[in-house]
Image (cartoon, coloured by chain):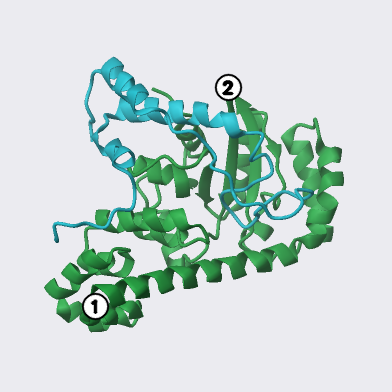
Chain colours: A cyan, B green
Amino acid sequence: MDQLRDEFLSEEDLDLRNLSEDELIAYWNLWLKQAQATNDLDEKDYSHGVFETAPGHGEYQPPLETSRRPQSQERTKLRRRSGDRRSL
Amino acid sequence: MANIYLELTEQFNTGRLRAIISSGQAVVLYRLAIMSKDGDWILREDAETMSHVLGVLAGRGAHYRFGAPLDLRWMAGGWSAHFEFRSAELRVRTDFVTRPPRLQLDSLTQLWETDPKKPVLGLIELAEIKKTNREKDYAVIGELARLMGDRSEQMLYSRSARDLLVLTAAHPELVNELARRRPLLREAVAGQARLETALDAERRSLMHANEQRLARYREAAKHWAAAWPAIEKEINGLALPSAHEIVLARALELLPFAS
């Protein structure tokens, strides 16, 4: 490969590979919990399937950033708390 | 440690493989990124599966969101069914299809040979599903391609011009054969800039194709959408089995089986 590499996702995203199974699930759960902050904003939206929005939502609006990513220091805390390394 | 989507998948698959984790949560399980709040499953297209999954959802206190009924007749037409419930502090949304876009029937049939201990959509099928009208999904496809073990698969799915130049240089014998399925591979001989332009055009073309697919469903569902606010009021507060009967009866009047 070239020294330069096309990048698609952030290093933080791809760092999921270095988490143990327990760390991954803890981080995933934390992410889902923090993502609830935008529930009111995406109440009518669909992310899968053939429906794009629930009726009565009015005109198209650009999709909102649906969630705040847990801060990297929180992920580090999770890792320290978990202690074990990725098992797969 | 528990996770709601893993728990649901286990419940859906009790006694038999019925549900394969797809889309955003599959991307998590491939350890690429966490990008979606909602769960998305491909279901086995049979009556027992529909009944079992509805039972699991009823046990969770789920209610219907706007969508098709979870019933074979609509699922076989490519429609999706959508539910929501609360689990502790989470709003959990569950989305179901039996005919995901861009997967041929033979690959759908093979899905049910997946290891029941790892009911996650395969890399190629996931890459196909991710050919949506959202830019961010093409970044995911780019990383999925890097996980694929087979050189031909990488050449068919890579989103990186640099990776494709290396692959086509190392395996020129594959280019002609694969270019029939992915014409942009022929651009590799013209260099990185041409390949990048072709990748951009390919992405745009795929996005427009998906937009057109969704537009067909939107048009087919227009009467259903108009009636939904009243149906939603009618089923509000009902247990899922009762709500399902009402949704089914109304859909028979208003939602065609196929788009």
Kindly identify the residue that appears in the image at 48 percent across and 33 percent down. A68
Task: Tell me which corner region of the image, top left, top right, bottom left or bottom right, holds residue B222.
Answer: bottom right
Residue B21 seen by the camera = no
Q: Quadrant of the C terminus of chain A?
A: top left
Q: Residue B89: which numbered mark, if any?
A: 2
Say above or below: B1 vs A48: above
Q: Name the subunit of mark 2.
A: B
Q: Residue B188: which numbered mark, if any?
A: 1
* Residue B106 position within the rendered picture, expressed as x and y whole percent measured from the top left: 43, 67
Say above or below: B217 vs B9: below
Q: Quadrant of the N terminus of chain A?
A: bottom left
Kindly identify the residue that appears in the image at 39 percent across and 59 percent down. B127
Q: Name the amino acid type tagged 1.
A: Ala
Question: Seen in the image, is A41 located left or right of residue B119?
Answer: right
Residue B87 seen by the camera = yes
| Frontmost residue, B151 versus B207 | B207
Q: Secondary structure at mark 2?
A: loop
How far separated are the C-alphas under marks 1 and 2? 50 Å
Q: Earlier in the sequence, mark 1 or mark 2?
A: 2
* Residue B214 position within the rendered picture, expressed as x and y whole percent measured from the top left: 62, 64
Query: Are both tags, 1 and 2, on one chain?
Result: yes
